[in-house]
Amino acid sequence: AAGGTADVGLVEEEGFDASQFLLLEPVLDLLELVSASKDPEKVSKAANGLAEKFENCHAILNNVLGTEVRGDKQVQRLEALEAKLHARRKLMEGYAELPLMKLAADTASQAGGTAQADST
């Protein structure tokens, strides 16, 4: 929770305000103006104001960390990391099959069996 609070503080310092994303009312106002007004200048002014609000929202969203990487690039990165993980798992399985590792595992299991036999 503490990290989230710090992040919010940083965002607020950069001028972010959640109310900038409240766009329903301006959209409804524009629709009412379009249907009721015969003054194209008022409609144009309202439309330009709404377009500016959308551009501001878009600019804020573009500056959110992580959004600079497109979805297909994220999928490619995930697939590459999964392939690397799979290769490392195969290596670990290979190491576990080495004679020295089997000897260590057998010794450990025998020591465990002896300890159990001693406790009974």
Image: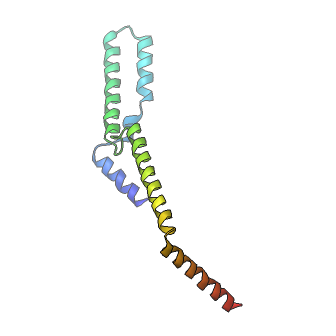
- Residue in view at x 41 percent, y 15 percent: 33
**Image coords of residue 115 (percent x, y):** 63, 88
Looking at the image, which residue sits at the far top?
Answer: 38
Display colour scheme: rainbow
- Residue in view at x 32 percent, y 37 percent: 62
The quarter of the displayed image where residue 22 is located: top left
- Residue in view at x 41 percent, y 47 percent: 80
Indicate whether 33 appears above or below 64. Answer: above
Looking at the image, which residue sits at the far right?
Answer: 120
Looking at the image, which residue sits at the far front?
Answer: 99
Quadrant where the N terminus is found in the figure: bottom left
Indicate whether 106 appears above or below 94. Answer: below
**Image coords of residue 94 (percent x, y):** 48, 64
The quarter of the displayed image where residue 43 is located: top left
- For this view, does 42 lie left or right of residue 1? left
Residue toward you, 100 or 52: 100
Indicate whether 50 appears above or below 99. Answer: above
**Image coords of residue 52 (percent x, y):** 31, 27
**Image coords of residue 81 (percent x, y):** 42, 51
Give the mark count.
Answer: 0
- For this view, does 62 lie left or right of residue 35? left
